[in-house]
């Protein structure tokens, strides 16, 4: 069997040891070579800092809470629904929505890297990418939930989804009874980022 | 064996530290720059997502452990740019280009195209002639050990903690590109992909709860039927 050739040289070690300088060196070389446009870098950063984030997923969840037909379509074939809503895109090409019930609580991780549904939630928070979360949540999900201050009823099962492929999972949390009279943006404001990953529950906006 | 990134189930890591809700802040200015540089370089079309994941996984274990998240991205990117002949090691060492690039200049991502490129994505689903072997509810067993069967030490998405384990098919996602092949330039080799549910008690010596499960996406060649 052929052997993987990557293991002998690690050219990255030629770059400066300080990470900020390392990025700048690589950016400088790529710009000088005409391969990277600094304005495109600014545009990418602006997109993920200001435009794409968990407010997208929250809108989907609030809609699913309000409209049973939409909810059913979302659970059956999320890609078609999200394409219609303009929420398709990089790292969200194949979305599966999993619904929390009194019987089952869903929780999402990527143990092998940090796969995450970018068009719906934006870039992942630091803890999602941390070794601690990746290593622990498949083996001891309830202890990890305790780190988030969340304790589940003992008759609720936990189902942890490890995103090893290009399928991205979004949790549809249970609708809090206090939101019965809310709709639209006021309802979406209850849907936290963590509730769509499964490490939290919807919360009254502060 | 798999590599250092394959940490699911590992003991010894500390608590998970929650963060405020909403869009996460970049902790350092260079984090956002490293992210953007990685995406813009990817748009040159010289590698796919499996190749870039594998580049990060091939970091020396001591580097993988000490590098922060975006340092891993950056190191993987630098290594790939050299492996693909886009940059030379001399240029990396000098921090300066030896001259403008070749034909790739035409593929440079323009600011005006960023939105469209991000929205276009890169689906992994493909037509495949490989027939679907398993149906929902069927019991299966995963390969052991967790290893690439095409390249020794190569990329695979079968986590070690779920190798040699019995589970049941929860859903079929259709045929997807096989990372074990795609990461090594051996073609898409698309085959059926499934979500497979494993009882926690099948994976861990001390499961937290008798009804807990872990669901892992598995390609058909990672699985065998359980009679």
Image: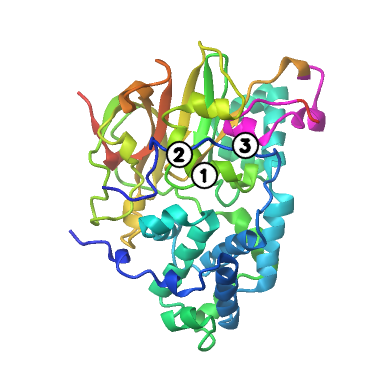
Residue A8, percent from left and from top = 30, 68
Residue B9, percent from left and from top = 38, 35
Crowd class of label 1 (few under 14; some 14 to 19; many from 20; radius 10 Å): some
Cα–Cα gap, marks 2 and 3:
15 Å
Disc 3 designates what residue?
A: B18
Residue B198, percent from left and from top = 36, 26
* A186 in magenta: yes
Check disc 1 and report its element: helix, strand or loop: loop
Residue B60 sits in quarter: bottom left
Q: Give the foreground label among 2 and 3.
A: 2
- Marks 2 and 1 in Cβ contact (< 8 Å): yes
Residue A150, percent from left and from top = 60, 23
Q: Report in which chain the residue with disc 2 lies.
A: B
Same subunit: marks 2 and 3: yes
Q: Choose between B126 and A13: the one closer to the eye.
A: A13
Q: Which residues are magenta?
A: A179-203
The dot on residue B13 is 2
Q: Choose between B81 and B193: the one closer to the eye.
A: B81
- Marks 1 and 3 in Cβ contact (< 8 Å): no
* B10 in magenta: no
Q: In the picture provided, is A175 more to the left or to the right than B149?
A: right
Q: Report in which chain the residue with disc 3 lies.
A: B
Same subunit: marks 2 and 1: no
Disc 1 designates what residue?
A: A130
Crowd class of label 3 (few under 14; some 14 to 19; many from 20; radius 10 Å): some
């Amino acid at each position: 069997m052929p052997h993987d050739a990557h293991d002998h040289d690690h050219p990255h070690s030629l770059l400066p040891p300080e990470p900020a300088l390392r990025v700048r060196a690589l950016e400088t070389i790529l710009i000088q070579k005409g391969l990277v446009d600094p304005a495109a870098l600014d545009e990418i950063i602006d997109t993920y800092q200001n435009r794409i984030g968990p407010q997208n997923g929250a809108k989907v969840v609030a809609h699913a809470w309000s409209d049973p037909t939409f909810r059913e379509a979302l659970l059956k074939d999320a890609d078609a629904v999200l394409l219609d809503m303009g929420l398709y895109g990089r790292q969200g090409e194949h979305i599966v929505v999993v619904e929390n019930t009194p019987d089952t609580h869903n929780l999402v991780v990527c143990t092998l890297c940090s796969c995450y549904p970018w068009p719906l939630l934006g870039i992942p928070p630091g803890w999602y990418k941390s070794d601690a979360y990746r290593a622990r949540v498949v083996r001891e999900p309830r202890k990890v939930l305790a780190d988030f201050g969340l304790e589940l009823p003992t008759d609720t099962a936990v189902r942890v989804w490890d995103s090893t492929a290009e399928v991205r999972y979004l949790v549809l949390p249970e609708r809090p009874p206090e939101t019965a009279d809310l709709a639209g943006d006021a309802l979406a404001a209850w849907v936290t980022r963590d509730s769509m990953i499964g490490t939290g529950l919807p919360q009254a906006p502060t | 064996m798999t590599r250092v990134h394959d940490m699911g189930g590992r003991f010894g890591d500390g608590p998970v530290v929650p963060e405020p809700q909403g869009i996460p802040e970049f902790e350092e200015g260079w984090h956002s720059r490293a992210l953007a540089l990685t995406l813009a370089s990817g748009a040159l079309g010289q590698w796919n997502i499996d190749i870039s994941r594998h580049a990060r996984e091939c970091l020396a274990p001591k580097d993988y452990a000490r590098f922060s998240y975006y340092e891993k991205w950056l190191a993987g990117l630098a290594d790939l740019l050299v492996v693909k002949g886009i940059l030379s090691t001399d240029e990396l060492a000098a921090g300066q280009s030896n001259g403008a690039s070749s034909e790739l200049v035409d593929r440079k991502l323009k600011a005006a195209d960023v939105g469209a490129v991000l929205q276009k994505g890169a689906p992994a689903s493909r037509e495949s002639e490989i027939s679907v072997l398993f149906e929902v509810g069927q019991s299966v067993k995963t390969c052991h050990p967790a290893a690439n069967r095409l390249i020794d030490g190569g990329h695979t998405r079968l986590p070690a903690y779920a190798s040699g384990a019995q589970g049941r098919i929860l859903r079929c996602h259709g045929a997807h590109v096989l990372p074990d092949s795609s990461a090594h330039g051996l073609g898409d080799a698309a085959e059926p992909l499934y979500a497979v549910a494993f009882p926690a008690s099948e994976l861990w010596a001390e499961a937290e709860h008798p009804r807990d499960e872990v669901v892992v996406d598995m390609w058909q060649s990672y699985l065998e039927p359980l009679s």
